[in-house]
Amino acid sequence: MTIASQGRYLNIVLLVALAFMTASNILAYQQMQKAIDSYERVTHTYDVLVASDNLQLRLNEADFQINQAYLTHRPLTSQASSTLLSQINKNIFLLSELTKDNPIQRQNLANLEAAIKERVIFQRENLSQNREQTNKKQLELRQSISLDFGQSRRLCKLI
């Protein structure tokens, strides 16, 4: 082999090595992008689940306080009810921000929000009624509530 042919051979080997390194770097970059995207999806899903659990916790607290008011014939304080409603509204807002990219989740959240509003209206009307209703009457009212604990849990899980 002459020096010129050795130089061409070396150039070809270096070009092949360079092409191989470039291809492997492109594949590694694509895999890294997929991993980052997957991580972001998992993190986003986790955030939605945490916000949904927090909302469910606030709804359960509200349900507990309302039941306690029914059973003890003591009215809810306006501060306690406004604090709970504020927390529930903050959680709904957070969930609406987190789910703005998913129309199915948005619809489920809208259904939950409508049910919560219906429940709040119902509870306000009933808590303002005469506190001396019999326990049987209170039980009938409680069973007629459209958003029970199980339904709110199911709606939160759908989100």
Image (cartoon, helix red, strand yellow):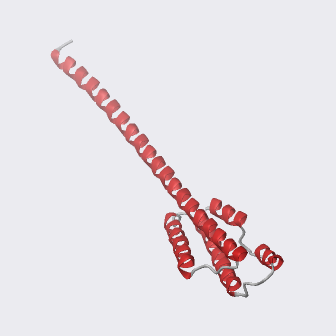
Residue 52: give x, y in percent of width and height: 57, 61
Look at the picture and state if 4 lies above or below 142. above
The answer to whether residue 110 is above or below residue 157 is: below
**Residue 149 location (% of width, % of height):** 70, 65
At 61% from the left and 79% from the top, the residue drawn is 76
Residue nearer the viewer, 107 or 88: 88
User: Compared with residue 20, is residue 152 higher up or lower down, i.e. above or below?
Assistant: below
Q: Decide which of 39, 21 is in the foreground and name it.
A: 39
Q: Residue 98: x percent and y percent?
A: 50, 63
Q: Residue at x 72, y 63 (%)?
A: 150
Report which quarter residue 151 is drawn in.
Answer: bottom right
Vertical comparison of 141 with 39: above or below: below
Lateral position of residue 104 relative to residue 73, left or right: left
Q: Residue furthest right?
A: 136
Q: Quick one: quadrant of the N terminus?
A: top left
Nearest to the observer: residue 88 or residue 135: 135
Q: Residue furthest top?
A: 1
- Residue at far left of view: 3
x, y percent for residue 159 = 61, 62
Q: Residue at the spot x=71%, y=76% of the render?
A: 70
Name the image quarter holding residue 21. top left
Total count of labels: 0
Residue in view at x 43 percent, y 40 percent:
31
Residue 22 left/right relative to 68:
left
- Which is more toward the observer, 94 or 66? 66
Question: Is residue 41 found left or right of 2 in the rendered image?
Answer: right
